[in-house]
Amino acid sequence: MNPGEIVLNGQLFAAVPIALLAGLVSFASPCVLPLVPGYLGYVSGMSNGPRTKQAPARSRVMLGTVLFVLGFSLVFVLIGAFAGTVGAFVVRWEDVITRVLGVVVIVMGLVFVGQFSFLQRTVKSSFRPATGLAGAPLLGVVFAIGWAPCLGPTLIAIQALSLTSGSAGRGALLGLVYCLGLGIPFLLVAAGLDWVTGSVAFLKRHIRAINVAGGILLIVIGILMVSGLWGILMSRVGVLIDGYVTTI
């Protein structure tokens, strides 16, 4: 499969913006947003040791944040590729699997709204990578593994889309787009832009509404998958894309 076929796949065309939005919603979740300053302090090497009046150089904070984002991106992209690979072997049962996964996505949407809170937990690891740039990628890996249950509602929805994509490449791409949605806000905060600080404060004030909206979106997607309308919608999107490519 060439890159053009991957990008122009109808299902992937619709799933990419969903994956990006899911990453943004994950960043605004209660298990990530309040801890952002701690993560940035950790990757810049300022979380431990004597406090000084001199703040770490902005370039150091940015580099540490980039390494942190690359760390959790590696994990999530590999998970997406694995889900897509599995999907390629079970494509003959795609309709049934899509409907079953739709039920899972609906449940995850309810979790995000506030139901079944026992399903949204973190796995606390005793492993603590070194602070600073050297430990930043490992912290990203630990974040991906330890916070996966807490990020479960959006993460499982993305893996469901990766599984139904039936391709390791498509699954990896959806994982990467999810990481962009989750990672870009980290980078913007690390850049220290004034408007980003105001935006984070806004998100904190409306964190409940954001999670409810994200949960409703997941429930709607799940209902479309269970009813079979998701497949029909993806087919029509694919036809539109094919028609557009033909006219180029």
Image: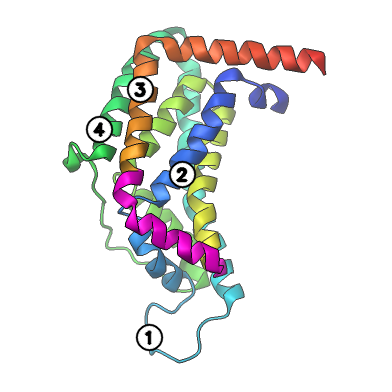
Indicate left or right for 114 with 33 as reference: left
* Position above or below: 130 against 21: below
- The mark that comes first in sequence, 3 or 2, is 2
At x 26% / y 38%, what residue is drawn?
A: 113
Magenta span has 198?
A: yes
* Position above or below: 247 against 176: above
Q: Amino acid at mark 1?
A: Gly
Residue at the spot of label 1 = 49
- Residue 183 point in image, percent of width and height: 51, 53
At x 29% / y 48%, what residue is drawn?
A: 208
Q: Nearer the viewer, mark 2 or mark 1?
A: 2
Q: CA distance from mark 3 to mark 4?
A: 11 Å
At label 3, counting other C-alpha atoms closer than 10 Å, the crowd grade (few under 14, some 14-19, many 20 or more) is many
Residue at the spot of label 2 = 23
Q: Quadrant of residue 42?
A: bottom left
At label 4, counting other C-alpha atoms closer than 10 Å, the crowd grade (few under 14, some 14-19, many 20 or more) is many
At x 38% / y 69%, what residue is drawn?
A: 38
SS assignment for the magenta stretch, majority: helix
- The mark that comes first in sequence, 1 or 3, is 1
Instruction: Report the front residue among 199 and 98.
Output: 199
- The mark that comes first in sequence, 1 or 4, is 1
Instruction: Report the front residue among 109 and 147.
Output: 109
Q: Amino acid at mark 2?
A: Gly
